[in-house]
Amino acid sequence: MPLMEIGLVPFGREDFQRLIGWIPDAAFLVQWAGTSQFRFPLDEAQLEEYLRPTQAVPPTRRAYKAVDRKAGEAVGHIELNDIDVRNRSARVARVLVGEAGLRRKGVGTQMLREVLRIGFCELGLHRIELLVFAFNHPAIACYEKVGFVREGVLRDARWHDGRFWDLVLYSLLAAEWERAAREGDRAGETPGRVPREAPRRNHEEG
């Protein structure tokens, strides 16, 4: 089956019910979103609050729905969170391929590559990081595939369901991403479609 061509467009109120429908139970919600932002059952009031940082000036969160460009259908969700203009950093979070039948077919990899392109090329970020539960091996494999580097383990960092859970910290720097993109071009892949010199925004403090 050929890969979809995935694009990212801003997540909005019109997408609330679709995302709610992708979250079947409390355990899935925690694995997708962690323990701090949402509670089960997910509802529109929680998502309204979730959108607030996307409306700040400048936004500290950019939330996206992933769209199959050929079919025009939404297939997932992803975000850049904790966007720090001064330090040119952000965190990838809440990565979700919505339908179970589309998982482990490369859709999540494409979503990650596109959000990295946005972060490094459009926003001029220097560092993008993420946190993942140590037990989430499929997600970890996907993150490592696109070039994220394991930095360490936050031991017993989250309390849920009567016990503590470890988180693993990964990061990717702009120079590492550009190098991987160019190597992918030579190999006939397109990990990021980075130009020979990635554009940089001039970030002013304040």
Image (cartoon, helix red, strand yellow):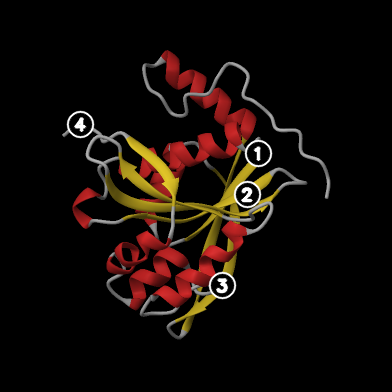
Query: Could you tell me which secondary element the residue under label 2 belongs to?
Result: strand
Pick whichever, 121 or 149, lies toward us: 121
Query: Residues under labels 3 and 2: Cα distance?
Result: 23 Å
For mark 4, what is the residue? 2
Residue 98 on image: x %, y %: 29, 56
* Label disc, if present, on residue 156 of the rendered structure: 3
Residue 48 on image: x %, y %: 49, 70
Residue 193 vertical position relative to residue 103 in the rendered view, above or below: above
Query: Could you tell me which secondary element the residue under label 3 belongs to?
Result: strand
Q: Earlier in the sequence, mark 2 or mark 4?
A: 4
Q: Residue at 63% x, 54% y: name it.
A: 59
Mark 1: which amino acid? Leu
For mark 2, what is the residue? 90
* Quarter the N terminus occupies: top left
Residue 150 on image: x %, y %: 56, 47
The answer to the question of whether label 1 and label 2 lie on touching residues, with beta carbons closer than 8 A, is: yes
Mark 2: which amino acid? Ala
Query: Residues under labels 2 and 4: Cα distance?
Result: 31 Å
- Please tell me how crowded label 4 is: few (under 14), some (14-19), or many (20+) other residues with Cα within 10 Å: few
Mark 4: which amino acid? Pro
